[in-house]
Image (spheres, rainbow, N blue to C red):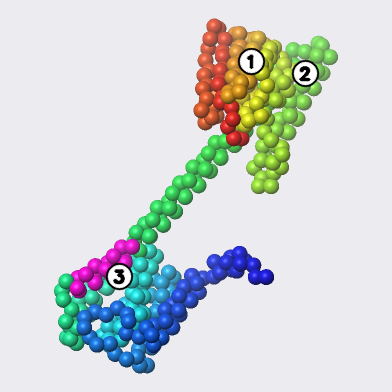
Amino acid sequence: MIDLRRVQALWRRCDVTVRDLPFALLLTVGSLLPAFQGRGTQIGELPSRPYDALAVVVIALECLPLAARRRWPAAGLVLVSLGFALDQLFAYHAVAGTALPIALISAGAHLERGRRVTVILLSAAYPPLMIALDRLGSNEGLADIVMFYLALVLAWGIGTWLRSTRAAEAERRRHVAEATRAAERTRIARELHDVVTHHVTAMVVQAEAARYLTADPDRLDATLTAVTDTGRRAIGDLRHLLDLLKADHDTDAGPPSAGDLHTLVEQTRQAGQPVRFTEEGEPAESAGSAEFVAYRVVQEALTNALKYAHGSHTEVRVCYGEKEITVEVGTDGPGSGTRSPGGSGRGLAGLRDRVDALGGEFSAGRQAGGFVVRARIPAGSAS
């Protein structure tokens, strides 16, 4: 059996001249058939002349350059125009005359350089052709001469419109590709920020606390173990993120979801942050991206609590509804004042963008001596 898709793929890989050649040959053969002799374009009233050897040359000059109509549009148009002029002057009136509007459309669509010069030269050649035909007795009226010229202009205009449409589509695709790349870079930057900032902040806070535990070997060992575990989790999360960038990544290994919040809260507690976690309801099966965004909101809020309110009581409340997930994370005060890495402000801005993308609401600000992060995330979005 012949694989049509493979044949089509091979055909598309051929040069455009090879792909345009069959049409040029078909028009040449069709124009030479006795049934179509003298049935082509006719300017004036010159009686049609029987085909001879010169007619074959003229028809070939009209049709065969169509094979180069996309590769060399200017040369193809000039040769076809010359063949058409000879066709009219010798009164063969071959069907091959239809090659002229085809060549004009192709040149208008594919000619890149010398477009204005081509139009001027061909337009300048049109009056001498009409004068020569008039002297041969064509008796073509001025109105008909102008109408025929306008028809040729229309063919060129169609090609120009096709060219502009193709250029506009290419520009649109370029903008879409740039926007897609920018969105992907932003997404990756957010993921890296969420993963790295949380784990590194926890490690820095734990390491700072370890300085004051040298007199208590047991607590010091537990703290250093927590630092090690946090580092390993950071490496694991980074590997997962890098795997997602591969084309053949394991699609079964999904991103963190709200179901991992217990682990996240426990990690924060190990870093020395007193956290109270309240969870209401059950995640809906159709929650989709809402679960992931809820996880990131809690993660970023706990990271900020470790940075700016280390040691302060932190309240995490997550409520699962049928149509939305509500998240609230608040701290009571500035905490112990332990030195911590500064922030760039990207975290909260990134959370606002995530929540807004799902049509939710996000707020973050000081309240009653502490800091509160709230998010309402509509559920049911495709992940």
Q: Is any part of residue 315 visible from this angle?
A: yes
Marks 3 and 2 close (CB-CB < 8 Å):
no
- Could you give the CA–CA distance between mark 3 and mark 2, rounded to whole angstroms? 81 Å
Look at 66% across and 40% down and name the residue there: 244
Task: Name the mark on residue 223.
Answer: 2
Q: From the top left corner, tell me how far across and down residue 190 is, in percent.
A: 58, 32
Classify 119 as above or below 301: below
Q: Quadrant of residue 241 in the image?
A: top right
Classify 41 as above or below 275: below
Q: From the top left corner, tell me how far across and down residue 14 is, in percent.
A: 54, 70
Residue 148 within the segment the image draws in magenta: yes
| Magenta segment main secondary structure | helix
What is the three-letter code of the residue carrying label 3? Thr
Crowding around mark 3 (Cα neighbors within 10 Å: few <14, some 14 to 19, many 20+) is: some
Split into 4 quadrants, where in the image is the N terminus?
bottom right
**Which badge, 3 or 2, comes first in the chain's sequence?**
3
- Could you give the CA–CA distance between mark 1 and mark 2, rounded to whole angstroms? 27 Å
The residue carrying mark 1 is 317
Q: Quadrant of residue 219 in the image?
A: top right
Q: Is any part of residue 74 visible from this angle?
A: no
In this picture, which residue range is highlighted in magenta? 144-158
Crowding around mark 2 (Cα neighbors within 10 Å: few <14, some 14 to 19, many 20+) is: many
| 83 left or right, relative to 135 | right
